[in-house]
Amino acid sequence: MQRRNFLGQSAGIAALAMLTPWRATATTSARTIIIGGGFGGATCARYLRLLDPGLAVTLIESDAAFVTCPFSNLVLAGMRTVDEITHTYARLRASAITVIHDTATAIDADNRRVALASGKQLDYDRLIVAPGIALKFDAVPGYDTAAAELMPHAWKAGAQTLLLRRQLEAMNDGGVVVIAAPANPFRCPPGPYERASLIAHYLKQHKPRSKILILDTKDKFSKQSLFQQGWNALYPGMIEWVAGSAGGLVERVEAASRTLVTESGFTEHRADVVNFIPPQEAGQIAQQAELTDASGWCPVNQLSFESLRIPGIHVLGDAAIAGAMPKSGFSANSQAKVCAAAIVAALRGDPIPEASYANTCYSLVGPDYGISVSAVYALTDSAIAAVKGAGGLSPSDADPAFRAREAAYARGWYSSITADTWG
């Protein structure tokens, strides 16, 4: 637990220790541009400035503030407001980072230039692309952007989160909530199951005769035994999980009637509220720039996160193929620091330093019931792999006091990593 707690609550301190080969001195005035202001992009911007104050760092982000997917499930449960998971870019600006609220529409890699929706064009020496995910609305027949207004995905936090919350509030006691979970890889592997847990917490308080059905594309999921143990303890009989091979694979949807069809059209599930989480791929600008491969994600040199398809462009966070690391906010934050160190080294003509990566994932099964998994990663044979014995999983035999501490650690982790990302 000591290692896991340290990772969860001291992300910034650990990263600074990792980056100690450099002093914060200005050695270059190179122009670096970051596309995307989430956990990956904003962290990279901050650490580029910390490592080399001479760099001209520009962050391009469409939205004036960032609403985090981590802790958005707490909004669904009424445990936090959207404002409490919304972060502005004011402190990045105070660190002499230029923040432009615009949309990157094209990348000219030959001329090292980024085009913006406003018509502006920006030149760069190094480009970092951290666009997060794009939802594959055409992957399941019947589910598209219009259907998402009836069966919200809520996998990009903000308006969709509030829509799903309103639907839960409007549902009658005794209603059925269906959560459809996608195949791997996708953003935040434990997220659908934490969501089921915290929706169950809300329903237990306000609509106790209601049920939750999870239709899963997969036959197993992250922290499965810990989640199911928590469901049995806190919400007995309320949550049912159906594996893909047992009929959980959704083959089409009928949004108007909130119906999901599985098992080659033989089984229909009608629900009062449907949270349909579609398959995912790298964000749109990464696809347009041809940074993706056939998988829909971006292959990178996992030491520097430089694209294997276009030199001079780095891709990190959810969009990147990062070995054994999951697509999570903590992973993106960790990768951003490694990427920043690699860029500064390259600009100085120094060797790229040996990298260390980390991820800690806390999930809340209830307000005072937390579970977690953590890992430390290293680069082996050109791929990021977990370091054996350098991680941990919450014990299955923990008592209520232990689960409550982990819930407190989860809240501390969120405060720590958001401060480390946005300042």
Image (spheres, rainbow, N blue to C red):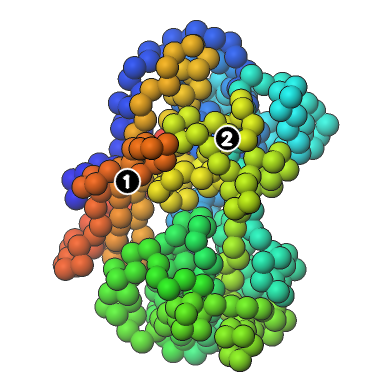
First along the sequence among labels 2 and 1: 2
Nearer-the-camera pick, 306 or 340 = 306
Residue at x 58%, y 34% (from the top left corner): 307
Residue 202 vertical position relative to residue 153 in the rendered view, above or below: below
Q: Position of residue 228 (x, y in %)?
A: 32, 75
Residue at x 40%, y 48% (from the top left corner): 324
Q: Are marks 2 and 1 in contact (CB under 8 Å)?
A: no
Q: Position of residue 175 (x, y in %)?
A: 53, 87
Which three-letter amino acid code belongs to the residue tagged 1? Ala
- For the residues labelled 2 and 1, the Cα–Cα distance comes to 22 Å
Query: Is 395 situated left or right of 70 in this image?
Result: left
Which three-letter amino acid code belongs to the residue tagged 2? Leu
Residue at x 58%, y 78% (from the top left corner): 250
Residue 152 seen in this snapshot: yes
Q: What mark, if any, has residue 386 been given in the picture?
A: 1
Residue 419 vertical position relative to residue 241 in the rendered view, above or below: above
The residue pinned by badge 2 equals 308
- Count residues near mark 1 (Cα–Cα under 10 Å), then give few for <14, some for 14-19, many for 20+: many
Residue 205 sits in quarter: bottom left
- Count residues near mark 2 (Cα–Cα under 10 Å), then give few for <14, some for 14-19, many for 20+: some
Residue at x 47%, y 66% (from the top left corner): 192
Q: Position of residue 380 (x, y in %)?
A: 35, 37
Residue 57 sits in quarter: top right
Q: Residue furthest front?
A: 381
Residue 395 sits in quarter: bottom left
Q: What mark, if any, has residue 63 been given in the picture?
A: none
Secondary structure beneath dot 2 equals loop
Secondary structure beneath dot 1 equals strand
Circle nearer the viewer, 2 or 1: 2
Residue 416 seen in this snapshot: no
